[in-house]
Amino acid sequence: MRGSVNAVVFVGLFASMVLIGMISMQSANAACMGQGCHGLDPISQGCDVNIRNGTNTPVNSELMVYVCKTSACGGVKWARATRSTFLNGSRFEVWLENEHGQRLSGTEYELQGGLQIYGDMWTGPVRACASIDGYLNGRARCTPVDY
């Protein structure tokens, strides 16, 4: 009985150490944390692990706008949009806005053509926005605010 109790305690301690090590490694790969990530690329900063989709908005059958978020870098978020049809030469743009609808400087990214696009990071309540010139007549489509 005593041997099995010791074995259970050992296994529990070992599992705890492995879990703590995994969390430390995940944070160690990140080059920034929280507000220090504002305006930085999530992939180049190592924040593109354990990504969850926050709020999203299907614009139509061809375009979806998301808020992506992760705890790996202190709860940062960024805009991401995907579309199913490649429109050569069209301007595809994403950015974040705060809960008052003000564009957050340094979070935008623009691409000519393409099927997927993402912007740079921010913290706090945000919504993701996207536009495709000529397809959405330059009007932005945004997600609800992600708190």
Image (spheres, rainbow, N blue to C red):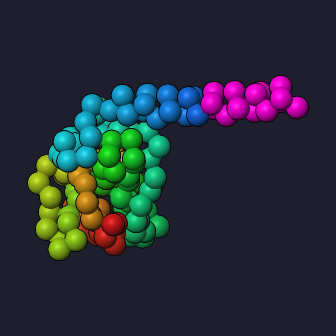
Q: Position of residue 6 (x, y in %)?
A: 76, 28
Q: Position of residue 71 (x, y in %)?
A: 39, 47
| Magenta region, main secondary structure | helix
Is residue 66 rendered to the left or right of residue 15? left
Quarter of the picture containing the C terminus is: bottom left
The verdict on residue 123 being magenta is no
User: In the figure, 113 relative to 98: above or below?
Assistant: above
Q: Position of residue 22 (x, y in %)?
A: 50, 31
Is residue 129 rendered to the left or right of residue 105? right
Quarter of the picture containing the N terminus is: top right
Q: Position of residue 109 (x, y in %)?
A: 21, 48
User: In the figure, 135 relative to 76: above or below?
Assistant: below
Along the viewing direction, whichever of 133 and 24 lies nearer the viewer: 24
What residue is shown at x 47% (from left), y 43% (from top)?
50
What residue is shown at x 39% (from left), y 41% (from top)?
72
Q: Which residues are magenta?
A: 1-15
User: In the figure, 41 relative to 84: above or below?
Assistant: above
What residue is shown at x 20% (from left), y 66% (from top)?
98
Q: Looking at this view, name the residue that lies furthest to the left.
A: 105
Instruction: Answer yes or no: is residue 81 visible.
Output: no
Q: Quadrant of residue 145?
A: bottom left
Instruction: Answer yes or no: is residue 73 visible.
Output: yes
